């Protein structure tokens, strides 16, 4: 009989400071697909699932993929949503016999009742399949990896890139390791090294800086006998939980001497470089000053609002940067996304070319990134916000902004959307008639992923902290549950 593998994808990055719970509707807004539909939509793109299927076809395995579900980063996942997402996996685990299980997770899910969402998925699974069946897990390198996750899954493998462009490759290599464990060629166990920090100094950035050398060290160590995978996780700092912080994992042969030493050395390097960020975080006024004099030398000026990134659970409706750009009379510019479902819906009833005055953005938490702006502009585009990506991350995949409009205000084309997504693909502007390649100034809400598509067209990239929910000023957030002392909330030697 062929090897039989059970697979499931349940992914969420939870910002516990976001007061809006993440419900099933939020998963539907990104994707919530039964197995066959998931394979059709995601099985031949840059996804972990595609890598799993690549391996399974080569090995002639039978794969039962039961669910693919992901919501945009946001508040704690409700118990109802969590239980509903786990149900197909747990039902399949208990009704048939499997040779192994592969889970596509994020690693930073927090639910209403469980601070370690992934650990809880694995606990429920183990209660059904027992302690010995091989279980492999793919992770995002912004995972907050708990000891429970390492105890409950023999194999844990994170992407090696940020921006994340190696999802399919990660799915493939993780599934190959699972196959070796099923065939009893290896007896893997995952060990963990952790440091008392909210995150690695650069959030795990791999396009430049010290993470390049760390990843090179990891790949070199993987060539040693008995070492199967080393994963470096920059962590997700917007989670007020006990097990927050950067980790280094090694999946190695059970009992291998020296395995822990390998990852402790990389973790030490993360700690020693904790005061060396690569980005210079400008104020919105400083960013607007640069934009005002930008001559479009070699391409547009890209301004990334790091703090209002919907991709990390910020509300995406902060207006501080937009307000500074309007005050500086910036023209030939675009800005997006501005998440304002109320105004996006209102503009669907307006004619193209109509002049309207609306209270824009700043409705969720005005103290974080600025309150609502009353603006007058011209409706340039309105309609359904479905986007098919063309870049390194979203290529071939669809995302929906929901009802969407473009309002031109004093020379700035503002992309107003209903569903929160960060900008990480040129099509997220181009679909709506905005050409970021020729626009003088492009202001977008993202931290790092935008670089994969926008760095090749940029004349210059600058990053600002608008004071929104993902601000780097962590002491302005009300951390209650993280262990203390912890860097940078506390002064540490």
Image (spheres, rainbow, N blue to C red):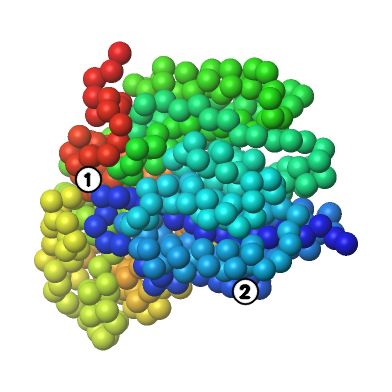
Q: Which of marks 1 and 2 is nearer the N terminus?
A: 2
Judged by depth in the image, the label closer to the viewer, 1 or 2, is: 2
Can the viewer see residue 2 in this picture? Answer: yes
Q: Using the image as rendered, state which of residue 107 and residue 461 is in the foreground.
A: 107
Question: Residue 286's spot in the image, x, y percent?
Answer: 21, 38
Q: Is residue 434 above or below residue 383?
A: above
Question: Dot 1, how many residues are within 10 Å of its Cα: few (below 14), some (14-19), or many (20+)?
Answer: many
User: In screen coordinates, is 358 left or right of 383?
Assistant: left
Where is residue 95 drawn, in percent x and y?
67, 68
Question: Is there any visible trace of residue 433 in the rendered image?
Answer: no
The picture places residue 101, in percent across and down from the top left corner, at 67, 54
Say which element carries label 1.
loop
Q: Which sits in the foreground, 488 or 431?
A: 488
Question: Where in the figure is residue 443, as x and y percent of width and height?
Answer: 32, 52
Q: Mark 1 points at which residue?
A: 466
For label 2, the SS is helix
The residue at 68%/25% (across/down) is 255
Point out which mark residue 37 bears. 2
Please tell me how crowded label 2 is: few (under 14), some (14-19), or many (20+) other residues with Cα within 10 Å: some
Residue under the point 68% across and 18% down: 257
Residue found 51% across the figure and 70% down from its top: 32
Q: Cβ–Cβ below 8 Å for labels 1 and 2?
A: no
Image quarter of residue 74: bottom left
| Left or right of residue 238: residue 65 | right
Extreme-top residue of the structure: 493
Which quarter of the rendering shows the N terminus?
bottom right
Q: How far, Cα to Cα, is label 1 from label 2?
A: 39 Å
Q: Residue at x 76, y 42 (%)?
A: 181
Give the answer, above or below, for where 279 lies relative to 114.
above
Q: In this view, does 11 lie to the left or right of 113?
A: right
């Amino acid at each position: 009989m062929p090897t039989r593998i059970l697979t499931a994808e349940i992914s969420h990055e939870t910002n516990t400071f976001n007061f809006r719970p993440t419900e099933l509707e939020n998963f539907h807004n990104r994707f919530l697909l039964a197995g066959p539909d998931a394979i059709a939509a995601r099985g031949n793109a840059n996804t972990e699932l595609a890598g799993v299927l690549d391996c399974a076809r080569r090995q002639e395995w039978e794969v039962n993929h039961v669910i693919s579900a992901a919501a945009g980063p946001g508040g704690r996942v409700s118990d109802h949503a969590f239980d509903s997402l786990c149900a197909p996996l747990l039902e399949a685990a208990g009704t048939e016999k499997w040779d192994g299980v592969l889970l596509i997770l994020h690693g930073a899910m927090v639910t209403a009742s469980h601070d370690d969402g992934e650990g809880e998925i694995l606990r429920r699974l183990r209660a059904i399949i027992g302690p010995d069946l091989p279980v492999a897990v793919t992770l995002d390198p912004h995972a907050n990896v708990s000891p429970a996750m390492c105890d409950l899954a023999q194999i844990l493998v994170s992407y090696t890139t940020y921006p994340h462009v190696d999802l399919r490759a990660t799915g493939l290599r993780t599934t190959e390791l699972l196959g070796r464990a099923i065939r009893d060629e290896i007896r893997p166990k995952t060990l963990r090294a952790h440091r008392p920090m909210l995150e690695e100094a650069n959030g795990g950035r791999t396009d430049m800086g010290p993470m390049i050398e760390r990843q090179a060290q990891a790949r070199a160590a993987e060539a040693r006998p008995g070492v199967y995978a080393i994963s470096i996780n920059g962590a997700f700092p917007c989670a007020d939980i006990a097990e927050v912080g950067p980790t280094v994992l090694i999946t190695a042969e059970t009992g291998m001497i020296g395995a822990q030493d390998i990852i402790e050395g990389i973790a030490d390097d993360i700690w020693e470089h904790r005061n060396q960020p690569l980005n210079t975080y400008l104020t919105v006024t400083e960013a607007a000053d640069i934009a005002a004099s930008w001559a479009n030398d070699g391409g547009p000026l890209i301004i990334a609002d790091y703090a209002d990134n919907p991709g990390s659970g910020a509300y995406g409706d902060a207006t501080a940067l937009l307000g500074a750009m309007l005050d500086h009379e910036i023209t030939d510019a675009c800005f997006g996304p501005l998440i304002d479902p109320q105004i996006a819906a209102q503009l669907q009833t307006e004619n193209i070319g109509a002049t309207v005055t609306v209270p824009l953005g700043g409705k969720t938490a005005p103290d974080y990134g600025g309150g609502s702006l009353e603006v007058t502009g011209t409706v340039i585009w309105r309609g359904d916000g479905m986007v098919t990506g063309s870049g390194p991350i979203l290529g071939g995949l669809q995302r929906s902004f929901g009802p969407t409009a473009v309002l031109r205000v004093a020379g700035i084309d503002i992309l107003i959307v209903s569903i929160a997504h960060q900008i990480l693909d040129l099509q997220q502007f181009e679909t709506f008639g905005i050409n970021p390649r020729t626009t003088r100034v492009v202001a977008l809400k993202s931290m790092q992923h935008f670089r994969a598509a926008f760095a090749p067209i940029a004349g210059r990239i600058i990053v600002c902290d608008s004071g929104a929910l993902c601000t780097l000023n962590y002491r302005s957030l009300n951390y209650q549950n993280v262990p203390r002392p912890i860097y940078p909330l506390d002064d540490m030697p």
